[in-house]
Amino acid sequence: MKTRIIRMLGIALFAVACSTPKTVQKDPVDYINPYMGNISHLLVPTYPTIHLPNSILRVYPERSDFTGDLLNGLPLIVTSHRGRSAFNLSPYQGEEQNIRPVIQYSYDQEEITPYSYSVYLDDQKTHIWFAPSHQSALYEIKFNTDKPAYLILNSGAGELKWNGKAVSGFQTIGNGTNVYIYLETQVQPTGTFLLKDGKLINSSGSEEKNACIVLKFGNQDSLTRVRYGVSFLSEDQARKNLEREIKNYDINSLAAEGRRIWNEALGKIKVQGGSDNDKVVFYTSLYRTFERPVCISEDGSYYSALDGKVHTDNGVPFFTDDWIWDTYRAAHPLRILIEPEKEDHILHSYIEMSGQMKSFWMPTFPEITGDSRRMNSNHAVASVLDAYVSGLRGFDINKAYEACKGAITEKTLAPWSGAPAGELDRFYTEHGYMPALHEKESETVPEVNQFEKRQAVAVTLGTSYDEWCLAQIAKTIGKTDDYKLFLKRSYNYRNLFNPVTHFFHPKDSHGKFIQPFDYIFSGGKGARDYYDENNGWTYRWDVQHNIADLVDLMGGRIDFIKNLDSLFSKPLGKSKFDFYFQFPDQTGNVGQFTMANEPSLHIPYLYNYAGEPWKTQKRIRSLLNEWFRNDLMGVPGDEDGGGMSAFVVFSKMGFYPVTPGSGTFNIGSPAFENTIIHLGNGKEFKIVAKNCSQQNKYILSAKLNGKEWNKPWFSHDDIKDGGILELVMGDKANKSWGSAPNDAPPSAEVIN
């Protein structure tokens, strides 16, 4: 059976072969390597998640890390990105006195695809197979020794009970939010028990920490199948979800349906050419963009942790679990291209969330348990604008504007805070920048997080971009006064530009630059006093909406290019040990450039704005080859549920949204000879890169929709009804292509 299942699923693709295999036609899902990046360079790794696209039911093996020698039972549902399973299932054969709430297993032969999981618990001689649906899943467990067989179900904080047919219960996961489960077995157990204080007790239920139900199946070689549903509404809804999605115990059919669903999702982009490793990195990155956000509508209803109520979705699926600070940059723009209806639903969900809060403020980090208000700024406004200028109309733009405006002007700008605007915000409104503290100066403002600090420069730059987005929306909906106000404030970044050093430099409340100052090391842990997770070299380029003005501030194109070149050549300045002790988020370095953190993703494309697109082409190819690889350390930093992976998807296709909300894309250097993007409206956008290869990374000439094209960018309007970008590639740069000043990508409106 195992051989048949593995052949059907195709999960032997990543196994080490002893002989050269025959060429086999692969589907997109066959290129996915869930293990890519599972060993972190320093902080959080990727996870080999088994799930269907944007679904509630997500699991991954529970172990200390990829190299962990033991599995901690089997997961049933992971309720948040990077979270642990809310319920745990432990198959067990052995002596009754050794039963524990969670069994740790030595394991081998683990094989993972997005739609299936297989592992052999070698000490216990038990085979495990798993396949998920959207809100339910199925385990098949083959016990292989002649000992008593048990299934142990554990809830860390909640209740479990047996009703004679199924186990049901819940776990509390925070902020008044429960996740519910309803679980059935194909074979009726011969006995059911509670596990308390290491002893089995005849009882039907338990409500306590580590609630634990034990099902006994007798003393035999046996095959046990377990199916279950999960819900954020109720145990009964968990049962309904199961009965709607999984009507039998056929794991082969369930996995085959999961495979079909993944091929349909991934097939929205088709690539030809490049190496197999290029395709693995590309499709694995695309797969990671489907992990979040998740649809939590269940038969037309959903539970909102924002107000503690169950709501009707009125036919529009409701989504949450999205770290917008990371995903607005590329994951949302990617979805606008390939899944515009889903993006409409996500933005509609954000507006609904705003109405469920005490204040009508757009969320920043919506999760299953509510909006955690992490990081700085409120870049959901960029996603709203980007969708609207791209033609999406499945959300109320007027309500979206009010929610965004409230989140930016009524809520404090202090990072990691949901407090109302206070002293710092009044200062920002009056002076146009967030004031910084001098070294060793004590904080006096209560809404400032003691660890995250003021992040004075990062907040000023991020808010300038947010207010540019507000200005564009205000203009669209006829709020002329707001447009003028926020457009003027979108230039607030100028208030912190140091004309001598050409860096954005923190100022104190008296308008004086903080001195002495080191753009690499000043600012404490992660430079959070002034920047955020990254140092001044990264935030030197954080003016996404107005790169043309940044070029002018730096003295023109020549000086801008010189400064940009220096980013990639400036040494760390200390040993790696000392540097990463202060900047653990700033890995993946090329000089001071960090490939590992989202504020850097647009930077390699900035050569397009100053007349040297060939350097963007060269840099993008080298960064992709250096830092995104088909191996266990093939992701340079925190992937953040699609935020960084979307950069890879775009960049390997050959373009990138430097300024979400502008409706434009910068051209880079495609890794594939042919790319077809199904736009979601029945149209196709094609990128044809003639002579594309590892060496031929430079654009010699281009055509867009049949016309000669000398601009290193194009607009959404250019491709919205389908089109073709034809590039002729070579191994030596054409330094004149895209170099004319009038060909540079557009920036914000000019204001004096």
Image (cartoon, rainbow, N blue to C red):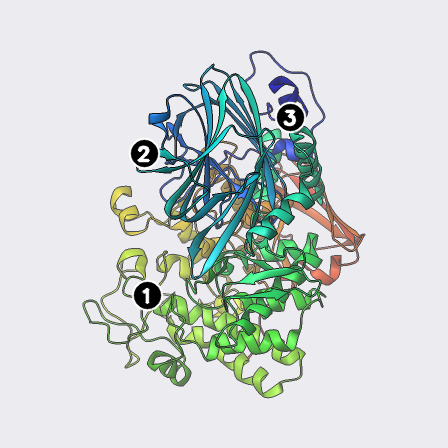
Distance, label 1 to label 3, CA atoms, is 50 Å
The residue at which mark 1 appears reads as 530
Eye-nearest disc, 1 or 3? 3
Eye-nearest disc, 2 or 1? 2
70 is higher (above) or lower (below) than 237? above
676 is higher (above) or lower (below) than 21? below
Name the quarter where the N terminus is drawn. Answer: top right
Rendered residue at 44%/19% (across/down): 122
Distance, label 2 to label 1, CA atoms, is 52 Å
Q: Secondary structure at mark 3?
A: loop
Other-residue count near label 3 (Cα within 10 Å), few / some / many at <14 / 14–19 / ≥20: some
Given the current orientation, which residue lies at the most extreme top position?
19
Given the current orientation, which residue lies at the most extreme left position?
440
Q: Earlier in the sequence, mark 3 or mark 2?
A: 3
The residue at which mark 3 appears reads as 10
Tell which of 556 and 194 is nearer to you: 194
Residue 316 in view here: yes
Other-residue count near label 2 (Cα within 10 Å), few / some / many at <14 / 14–19 / ≥20: few
> Which numbered circle lies on residue 198?
2
Q: Earlier in the sequence, mark 1 or mark 3?
A: 3
Rendered residue at 39%/85% (across/down): 430
